[in-house]
Amino acid sequence: MTPGARPYYVPVGTEEQVFKAAFRQGLSVVLKGPTGCGKTRFVEAMAHDLDRPLITVACHDDLTTADLVGRFLLQGGETRWVDGPLTRAVREGAICYLDEVVEARQDTTVVIHPLADHRRQLPIDRLGAVVDATPGFCLVVSYNPGYQSVLKDLKDSTRQRMVAIELNFPPPDVEEKIVSHEAGVDHDTAALLVRLGEAIRRLEAVGLREVASTRLLIAAARLVAEGIPARAAARAAVAGPLTDDPMVTAGLFEMIDAYLPDDG
Amino acid sequence: MAVARRDVDRLRLLASAIAGRTIEVAVAGAGERTWTDGTTVFVDSGAGPADQVRMVTVQAALVGAGSLEPGIVRQLGRGSALARRYLAVEGHRALATNEVLPPVVRSLVDLDVAGSVGRAEDSLGVARTRRANDDPPASFGVIRPRRLLASAERTDGAVGVSDRVRGGPQHETASQSDEDDAGDADWRRAGHLMSSPVGGRGALGRLLKRMLSATRGPGAGGPAGANAPIHVGRARVRRQGTGSPTSGAADAVAQTTELEPRGRTYPEWDVHRRRYRPNWCTVLEHTPRPQDGAPMAVPDAVSLRRPLARLATGLDRTRRRPQGDDIDIDAAVEAQVELLAGSPPGEAVYVESLRRRRDLAVLILLDISGSAGEPGPARRTVHQHQRSTAAALAMALHDLGARVAVYAFNSHGRRAVHVGRIKGFDDRFDARAVHRLGGLVPGAYTRLGAAIRHGASVLEERGGTSRRLLIVLSDGFAYDHGYGGRYGEADARRALTEARRRGLGCLCLSVGAGTAPAALRRVFGTSAHATVPLPSQLPGLVGPLLRAALRSAETERRVFQRNERRKRLELEARMIP
């Protein structure tokens, strides 16, 4: 189900080994990390390595249990049950990835409880059936502990059914490699952008709500690859997404000018 | 000319990133070269934009590399010659070791010099042996040892008055320089605490900064608000109830708050001098021990529910509605099935946005000072009346889906304002909380202003909703050491005004206390307040009162946001060169 090349992911620590071990043991995994640090890409790479299909659900606060499990639909005057993504993954033995799981309402997330622990079953009350997980099924959820409000947190009963893997921004040399590979820019441009990103990340301790993620740096590099001058690219792809505050924007522009060459 | 006008504030983020901590950037005095006091970089106004960037980078790198630690700076002495030679060496080391050095500065670094020294001490050693003609590049600026030491002492002083008593060389240097800019010191200290390159420019940071900028002066001693003996009282309260073992969800919350500093300081308004005393009051939060079988009248929460039912609700998407902006697929399928089965189909097949969800956080502040122990009507004390009112309000609001917290406060002087958490926003409202409430024993005094300020900040930090309401249950009798009469009343009134300016609704209720309406007005000012003779009369009054408090908060919030917006636009206009 995952033809072609392996999605580009450079391991930083033992995350690949831990994930594969958890997969073999039938444990569920929670990925923690800031936005844009490579959580989704990591899961894609793992699904490729393990040769399992990947079913991704982006969670939002209006996600119902039926959206995950499935519902009856009408077809030619008859009702027909249609599996939701979670049920499909359970039946096919796929990796089911619930992205930003805290965004979903807590009453929705409890449906994964029997799947996430030793039972590995999905009860579907509308069908009156219990579906046993096919071998190869693996539940992966992700969340970003940083920006959640006090109202949004993962339930303890959910958390304790998971193995946690913490991901963070890669070290500069790895990140340079990633930026240069993803955007197709030369190594020097990537190095400059990564240094700018590192500098912005040092501001995290002093108040910027979100910092420049690897994803933002790649976006800037891709603009550069299209022929946009480096400073303009960083203004559009790094400073703009990070803040709306004119004072902070001015400060970020100043940093961009200090870190990137004036080539246009 | 155009250069001098350039807003150097824009370099703040760059400086903070390089130093790895918050650094302010300001324009140096006329004719001064670029220097730093360890928290602010003062930029030479005569330099060009590119040079200014270099100068700020060098000074910020010095801060980040620990080159300006007091231990080193003290050895530089008064003369500028050694400091200059030290900068000529250490500047290169600081730049070379910086992890995020911008490329534009790289040409400044002399790697030979940087490579010859490993630590700031080494640079100092080299500087001592060198000849005087080794001047640092002009873009390095200067090191001013005296100003650095004075500033280091000021930041130390912010930690606590007791630190000042340590004495030593640091103390001597400070007493001397404090004379020339003591006023500045306090301002910068206060400003430093709440400013970050980003967050400090937020609404609250700006407000506090504005408030505190009126406070110039060392702020120690003085008649009103001065500290009376407090240690005895503090110990007594400790024994009465702190550190109760809790479990479950409450435990998790307790652990997270434990990470924060235990005592939080708040300013106090000195009406006689018409200015704030920064960091004047220390609020200590604790969790009172639940008391089993504590006698407490079961409050009538049900009768309160009706007047509160329509208070502050937010939008929520509701399914199975007869109209709406989206089709509810499950309901539509069912309707079709019913139709095909021959029974009349349900028509409620839409998803509609309704004001159902309670968008309200309420923090109830209960006054448990000694005066509440006085007898009130119906052969019960004021405290008993207030306590059952707090319980009834909390239960009713909790049942209706609002986020509720209950805190109780009393004080023993300005350094021991005790605030007990009966129920935090994330705690469960269980028997334990009720027992904690029932176990409260009134005692000590009322530093109303500090308690209100603390309540307001807890509400802002942990409330988590857009509509927020602070309910103060007090007899309105503000009294503490150095906190009596007009002084205390003015501070309490001020604290309420601050909270309302920030968009919090404030309601002050005096239940069962015989305080005269005029006295209440002096304390609560224009905030919504009311005297309720008996808790049973509350249901008729509470609805309109809460609505009024929320409405005025809404207006204040809009005004506040508009002012903030206008200020931002003005700043923006100024920034366009």
Image (tube, rainbow, N blue to C red):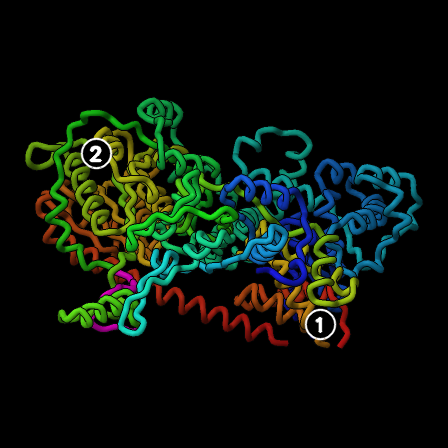
Q: Position of residue A7 (x, y in %)?
A: 65, 59
Left or right relative to A158: residue B515? left
Quarter of the picture holding the C terminus of chain B: bottom right
Residue B201, magenta (yes or no): no
Report in which chain the residue with disc 2 lies. Answer: B
Q: Which residue is mark 1?
A: A224
Q: Dot 1: within a 10 Å radius of its alpha carbon, few (fewer than 14), some, or many (20 or more) residues?
A: many
Q: Position of residue B276 (x, y in %)?
A: 43, 49
Specify whether disc 2 shares its chain with disc 1.
no
- Looking at the rendered structure, the kind of residue marked 2 is Ser
- Residue A108: tell me if it is visible: yes
Q: Secondary structure at mark 2?
A: helix
Residue in view at x 79 percent, y 63 percent: A188
Left or right relative to B418: residue B174? right
Q: Position of residue A54 (x, y in %)?
A: 53, 57
Q: Which residue is mark 2?
A: B371
